[in-house]
Image (spheres, helix red, strand yellow):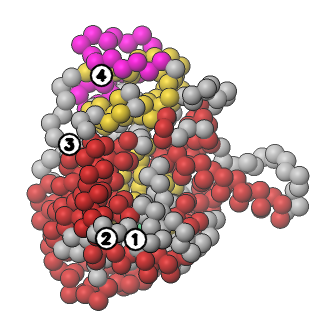
């Protein structure tokens, strides 16, 4: 995709820069030249720029999701009423084996477009549906078409029965794909390795995956659903900040300390954790331990492609955890005291922007609105009736919804404007979802 040579000027918005030196700016302009933010401030020069009227709106860095399985988008709703991981493992996960490469391509495209529409400008796609090499190629080609910024997590966890025998071609394909793509430093779609789960594959398979990722300079991510796995990686000398563990619900506090020591983060997927009936205390424990959390939708078969609701739910889970601790300590009714409450709504916007940018290895370039950063931005209508009083970041976390997303810019390209995706992307995504459902289920929709 060629970088645009044109300039854009977002005029007169309430800018939440998330940049410590710039802070919030009222009625400010943001000038974009090519792929990058050129200037932020009041009364900027609009000459030669396509002007976008941001008056009365809030401009935030594009939201970044650090853990979603995009192939599940067309299965939306199938996981709605499920109870625990058992239901998921019986009814949803096995469907991946019925997806052809073409299905993965269509599903990935449709899900990426819907995310963009909802203000999610970047995503770590944990693609654990690489059943054949063609599946990975189709997923990557679909990402190349959406305009979303993507870290494609090449899934090492294939069919359980053939994990070991399939392993060589997976490693070889990662090497080949990186060779093809490494030349384009400006690429919107980049490669990473979604390691096979340790509890299924064991260190014997996972260690060569880590070695390959490090040899090629690729970031890694993995599902961490069993206590002790961080200890295991650390003990083998393998733990590093280039790995993003996901969920981490049963993680031990000593393991969080190890992640903090190496400057790493975790991806927390609140609605999915609650839906699976897992403990959610990790998000507060991680924050306190100095681990930088970020957020993900995880399973579109059950969770809406919406980071506003994930920020809100996470804030409430953390407040609930804290209140429970206070009640247990006999401090009821609740009172403020030093360090309590420890979380504010603005922290959650940091999870979905600056923290998430760091988690996908782009902390220097993404997650903030500042000169030199890549131009990934979301312009939000500030409420149909009236904006919130007080902190505008609290408005984003506690009041805003996907219907407020007016304009979406990725890499300097306008992908949505005036509340509508450009270039017929929504219609193309609807068609892609319909094709996947027809091929998977025929004319009959599956029963709940
Ligand atoms: Zn997951």
Q: Return the residue at label 4.
A: 8
56 or 221, nearer to the observer: 56
101 or 31, nearer to the observer: 101
Q: Secondary structure at mark 2?
A: helix
Q: Secondary structure at mark 4?
A: strand
Q: Is residue 26 magenta?
A: no
Whether label 3 touches label 4, CB < 8 Å: no
Q: Return the residue at label 3.
A: 186
Q: Residues within 10 Å of mark 4 (few under 14, many from 20)?
A: many
Q: Which residues are magenta?
A: 32-55
Q: Secondary structure at mark 3?
A: loop
Whether label 2 touches label 1, CB < 8 Å: yes
Q: Return the residue at label 2.
A: 441
Whole-number angstrom distance, CA of label 2 to CA of label 3: 39 Å
Q: Which residue is found at the position 24% from the left and 64% from the top?
A: 103
Give how far across and how far down residue 225 sits, in percent: 49, 75
- Whether residue 162 sits left or right of residue 119 in the image: it is left
88 or 230, nearer to the observer: 88
Q: Quick one: label 2 or label 1, which is nearer the N terminus?
A: 2
Give how far across and how far down residue 376 sits, in percent: 35, 36
Q: Which residue is found at the position 43% from the left and 77% from the top?
A: 91
């Amino acid at each position: 995709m060629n970088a645009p040579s044109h300039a854009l000027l977002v005029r007169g918005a309430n800018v939440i820069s998330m940049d410590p030196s710039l802070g919030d700016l009222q009625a400010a302009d943001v000038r974009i030249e090519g792929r990058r933010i050129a200037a932020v401030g009041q009364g900027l020069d609009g000459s030669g720029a396509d002007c976008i009227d941001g008056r009365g709106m809030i401009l935030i860095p594009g939201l970044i999701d650090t853990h979603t399985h995009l192939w599940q988008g067309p299965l939306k709703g199938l996981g709605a009423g499920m109870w625990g991981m058992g239901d998921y493992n019986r009814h949803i996960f096995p469907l991946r084996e019925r997806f052809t490469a073409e299905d993965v391509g269509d599903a990935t495209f449709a899900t990426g477009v819907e995310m963009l529409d909802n203000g999610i400008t970047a995503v770590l796609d944990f693609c654990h549906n690489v059943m054949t090499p063609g599946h990975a190629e189709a997923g990557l080609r679909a990402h190349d078409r959406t305009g979303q910024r993507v870290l494609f997590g090449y899934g090492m966890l294939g069919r359980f029965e053939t994990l070991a025998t399939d392993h060589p071609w997976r490693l070889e394909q990662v090497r080949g794909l990186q060779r093809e793509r490494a030349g384009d430093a400006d690429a919107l779609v980049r490669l990473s390795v979604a390691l096979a789960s340790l509890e299924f594959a064991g260190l014997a398979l996972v260690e060569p995956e880590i070695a390959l990722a490090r040899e090629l300079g690729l970031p890694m991510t993995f599902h961490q659903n069993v206590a002790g796995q961080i200890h295991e990686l650390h003990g083998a000398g393998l733990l590093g900040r280039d790995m993003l563990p996901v969920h981490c619900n049963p993680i031990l506090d000593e393991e969080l300390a190890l992640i903090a020591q190496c400057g790493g983060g975790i991806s927390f997927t609140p609605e999915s954790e609650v839906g699976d009936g897992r403990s959610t205390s990790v998000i507060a424990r991680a924050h306190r331990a100095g681990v930088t959390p970020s957020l993900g939708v995880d399973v579109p078969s059950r969770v809406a492609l919406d980071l506003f609701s994930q920020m809100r739910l996470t804030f409430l889970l953390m407040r609930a955890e804290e209140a429970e601790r206070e009640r247990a300590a006999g401090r009821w009714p609740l009172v403020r005291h030093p360090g309590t409450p420890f979380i504010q709504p603005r922290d959650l916007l940091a999870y979905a922007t600056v923290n998430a940018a760091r988690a996908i290895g782009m902390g220097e370039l993404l997650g903030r609105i500042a000169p030199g950063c890549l131009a990934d931005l979301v312009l939000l209508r500030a409420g149909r009736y009236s904006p919130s009083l007080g902190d505008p970041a609290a408005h984003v976390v506690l009041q805003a919804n996907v219907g407020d997303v007016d304009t979406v810019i990725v890499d300097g390209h306008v992908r949505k404007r005036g509340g509508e995706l450009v270039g017929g992307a929504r219609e193309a995504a609807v068609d892609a979802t319909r094709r996947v459902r027809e091929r998977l289920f025929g004319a009959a929709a599956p029963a709940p």
